[in-house]
Image: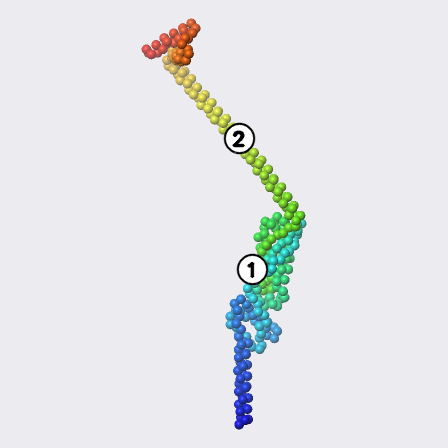
Amino acid sequence: MNNQGIGLSGGTIVLILLALLIIVAVFRGIRVVPQSEKFVVERFGRLRSVLSPGLNIIVPFLDRVAHKVSVLERQLPTSRQDAITSDNVLVAVDTSVFYRITEPEKTVYRIKDVDAAITTTVAGIVRSEIGRMELDQVQSNRSQLINAVKTHLADQVDDWGIEVTRAEILDVNLDEATRSAMLQQLNAERARRAHVMEAEGRKRAVELQADADLYAAEQVAKARRLQADAEAYATSVVAEAIGKNGLEAAQYQVALKQVEALTALGQGTGKQTIVVPAAALESFGNAFQMLLKGRNA
């Protein structure tokens, strides 16, 4: 009975070991990949497959997960590159790059230090692009420089299974001597603009004054023209009256004016006595006679 008990115990152990082996195989063959990662699977040291997020099955004891790669977007630390512009100005450019891994099998087998490789590549691209631009272009066309860096960087890191999502030029720094020279140039430009604006103001004032003088002259000429037209009209009326009524009409008008003048003279304050020459009295007499004839007529 002892031997039979021992035999049963041995079979039971085998079954238990077999069950444990199956359980271990199941656990080693099932891989759950998080949403933010991808797993690189190797078989005997060679690339077998890349597991996507979710539930995956591999061959236990033959396949193994060699690399777990995050596919989240990454930001490189801000780096500074020295570059010389086409007009021989030394600048220090602060850059920052954002990227994510899209093909982990390329990243883990083709490049060792991704961050260092991208940083070095960015430095070369920035120096090359800035070397083609003048300092004013670097400062004013920063978006153009950013697009150039992103485009060239995307082309060069494509073999590494990386997608460059964004590249930023954070700052363009100058040395103290260059800053001082630029400040002097800026002040000179401001002074020049101020002088130009002042000169334009004086010119505009002269133009406005000339326009005002011209307008005044035109108005005076217009007034004189109207006065001349009025005098010409009065003359024509008198001439027409003379033509119709003869010389007596003109003498009548003269006599009327003389009487009006004598009346106004007599109405002046402090002039009770008026001395009139005899010739004037004769003229006034003729004027009164003309007036009487004119009224009787």
Mark number for residue 209? 2
Q: Quadrant of residue 46?
A: bottom right
Q: Quadrant of residue 265?
A: top left
Residue 102 in sight in this render:
no
Helix, strand or loop under label 1: strand
* Horizontal side of residue 218 vs 155, given as left or right: left
Instruction: Give the residue displayed 54% in from the left and 79% down from the top.
Output: 24
Q: Residues within 10 Å of mark 1 (few under 14, many from 20)?
A: some
Residue 74 in sight in this render:
yes
Give the image location of residue 117, x and y in percent: 63, 62
Residue tagged 1:
165
Instruction: Give the residue displayed 53% in from the left and 75% down from the top.
Output: 30
Instruction: Report the amino acid beneath label 2.
Output: Gln
Helix, strand or loop under label 2: helix
Could you tell me how many numbered marks the image carries?
A: 2
Give the image location of residue 247, x and y in percent: 39, 11
* Horizontal side of residue 44 vs 282, given as left or right: right
Residue at mark 2 to residue at mark 1: CA–CA distance: 62 Å
